[in-house]
Amino acid sequence: MKVLVTRRIPDAGLALLNEKFDVEVNPHDRPMSRDELIAAARDADGVLCLLTDRIDGELMDALPQVKGYAQYAVGYDNINVPDATARKIPVSNTPGVLTNATAEMAWALLFAAGRRIVESDAVMRSGGWAGWGPMQFIGGDVTGTTLGLVGAGRIGTAMALKSRGFDMTVLYTDAYPSETLERELGARRVDLDELLSESDYVSLHVPLMDSTRHLMSTPQFKAMKDTAYLINTSRGPVVDEAALVEALKNGDIAGAGLDVYENEPDMAPGLAELPNVVICPHTASATVSSRNGMAVKAATNLIAMLEGTPPPDCLNPEVLG
């Protein structure tokens, strides 16, 4: 059997695949174009894909011999799961292994934005610092402030639990109550409007769906405190990026820390020039253990698909019967 890996992943996953299959890996350090993907997968039995690959019915029909698609990511908004289910093709993702890494990145962005780390680092590197002054780079407090979580799943919960050392009040909005957050932190479940008006830091942890696209736009930024900060490690289109640029320019909010963008790899015009935003290139899962774990999970899922056993992280298990 042959599998296609649409972009090089850590060797921990490739080694598992090489033990079982003839493996072709995208030789370029960039996403494959759709035509390249179809051409490379013409004789593949399985595909290990990434967020940058659009996997839909049209692609599946062009590659009727592919028996499964294993995603190297926890998010899967690039995959049309109903299309796969209609064709009885299993698809999978890699939950769990990047939870702490992503939660840690949310904290890194929170501190970097709130304490203006990137701004002050730039001044030091430029040689423009003339010495200490009492009004320089005054940022936001963290200890004793209010953290608002939009989404209380695995990553949102992990981020919130790490707030215990900072004696923060925790608010969250989610479709379901979180017994863990309420028991461990005394967190309160509130609606989005209340969360935005009361939080000093708003951290986004929701999947990208029709209901969450542009969840944060002009009305929401205006509802936030002008001293508050937005943190996004979820999905770029959850935030109306053009509206965020205006909110940061106008002082509707104090700052933002972003790891994801609405039209990756592009950013909204003007975002990169703003001093009150920290911008990272989608690296929340970029730790050794997380990336190796993702590779192993994706490979394990694909192996199961091709060997006819249930993939551990199948997103449409109804096709397995």
Image (cartoon, rainbow, N blue to C red):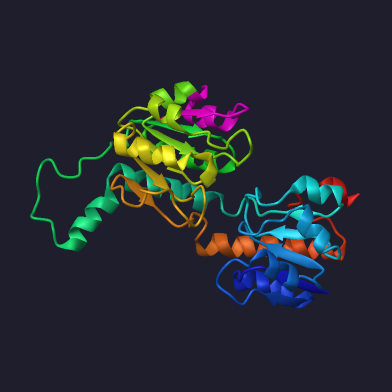
Please provide percent x and percent y for residue 132.
Answer: 9, 50
The x and y percentages for residue 180 are 57, 32
Q: Residue at x 34, y 31 (%)?
A: 145
> Is 59 left or right of 142, judged from the image as shown?
right
Q: Quadrant of residue 20?
A: bottom right
Q: Residue at x 10, y 41 (%)?
A: 134
Coordinates of residue 182 in the picture (x, y in percent)? 53, 27
Residue 180 lies in the magenta-colored region:
yes
Q: For the point 73% across and 63% down, which residue is it?
A: 300
State whether residue 90 is above or below residue 14: above
Residue 273 inside the magenta-drawn segment = no
Residue at the image position 82 percent from the left and 68 percent from the top: 45
Instruction: Pick whichever, 100 or 25, lies toward us.
Output: 25
User: Dividing the picture into quarters, in which one does residue 168 lie?
Assistant: top left
Q: Is residue 295 above or below residue 273?
A: below
Determine if residue 92 is in view. yes
User: What range is drawn magenta here?
Assistant: 169-192
Find residue 51 and report its horizontal and vertical position in percent.
62, 56
- Would residue 159 be found to the left or right of residue 35 on screen? left
Up-down relation of residue 302 to residue 86 (above or below): below
